[in-house]
Image (cartoon, rainbow, N blue to C red):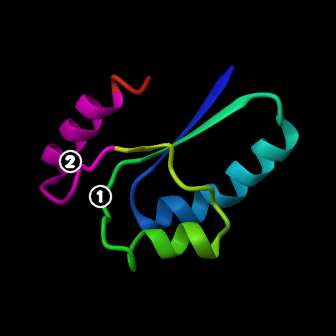
Amino acid sequence: MTIVYVVGARPNVVKMAPVISTLRRRLPSERHTIVHTGQHYDPEMSDVFFEELDVPAPDHLLGVGSGTHTVQTARVMERLEPVL
């Protein structure tokens, strides 16, 4: 089984940090994959939260960037499909 965690903005990383930590600890034999949408791509808006919350570096970076909600959602869907 592969567990995929998709995070995009800072609040997602903050909320998912304990979930990722707990599931990795409880299911060590499963594959855990972190996907970062890249909505927040500035290191001060993204990388620092991974480091401070001890979340492993993402396995995939989708590079969605900024845009309207519709544009960002479409980019996430397009770029997430090959990962899944």
Q: Is residue 55 above or below residue 2?
A: below
On the rendered image, what quadrant is the C terminus found in?
top left
Residue 64 shown in magenta:
yes
Give the residue drawn at x 62%, y 56%: 56
Q: Is residue 80 above or below residue 50?
A: above
Q: Which residue is mark 1?
A: 39
In terms of depth relative to the viewer, which is nearer, 55 or 9?
A: 55
In terms of depth relative to the viewer, which is nearer, 70 or 37?
A: 37
Range of magenta residues? 62-80
Q: What's the amino acid at mark 2? A: Gln
Q: Real-space Cα distance between discs 1 and 2?
A: 8 Å
Mark 2, other Cα within 10 Å: few <14 / some 14–19 / many ≥20: some
Horizontal relation, residue 46 to residue 68: left or right: right
Q: Position of residue 31 (x, y in %)?
A: 68, 30
Q: Position of residue 8 (x, y in %)?
A: 40, 55
Q: Which residue is mark 2?
A: 72
